[in-house]
Amino acid sequence: MGEGETEQKKLSIGNLKAGALLVSAIVMIGIIGYGFIGMFQERADLNIVSSKWTYYPQSTSHYVRVSVTIFNRGDRFARDTELTITIYDYWGFRLKTEVMNIGDIPPRAYESYFFKIQYSGNVTSVTTTLMWSAP
């Protein structure tokens, strides 16, 4: 084996190490970059855009019809979303509370829901609140 072949093998091994180092650096930059970008992504952020209710006092059974429009202004899904509807009477006493599981809401999306809730008493107000989890 001559001196030129030894130098060529050293050069080949050096190129291989440099290539491996470059690939490792690119992978690390990709991982760190993805995490860095992820820090600035908005999580799920739900807002009740519209909430309306109408009560229907009937002789046999009273009910409230609630319509709700929700907007997810975040960049991620809102998972396991629950809408809590609470019905109050004139004196502020809670007549009924219903928790509705409305599932997942996609990012940047509007969703509308309608519910019919039976109750007893005279309704003067209805509140709606949201709970959700973000991955």
Image: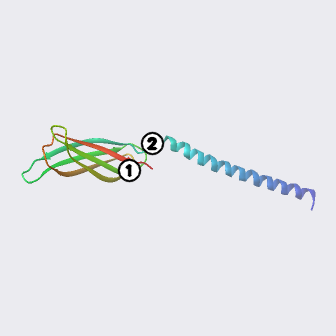
Residue 85 lies left or right of residue 34; in this view the side is left
Secondary structure beneath dot 1 equals: loop
Mark 2 Cα within 10 Å, few/some/many (few <14, many 20+)?
Answer: few
The image position of residue 84, as x and y in percent, is 28, 47
Q: Which residue is mark 2?
A: 42
Out of 121 and 72, give the one closest to the viewer: 121
**Callout 2–callout 1 Cβ contact below 8 Å:** no
- Please, which residue is most extreme toward the right here? 2
Element marked by disc 2: loop
Marker disc for residue 87: none
Name the residue at 22% across, 51% down: 115
Disc 1: which residue: 106
Looking at the rendered image, the quarter that the N terminus falls into is bottom right
The reply, left or right, for residue 91 in relation to residue 98 is: left
Check disc 2 and give the amino acid type.
Glu
- Looking at the rendered structure, the kind of residue marked 1 is Pro
Type of colouring: rainbow
- What is the CA distance from the residue labelled 2 to the residue labelled 1? 13 Å
Percent across and percent down for residue 81 are 35, 50
Q: Residue furthest top?
A: 91
Residue in the foreground of this view, choosing between 132 and 89: 89
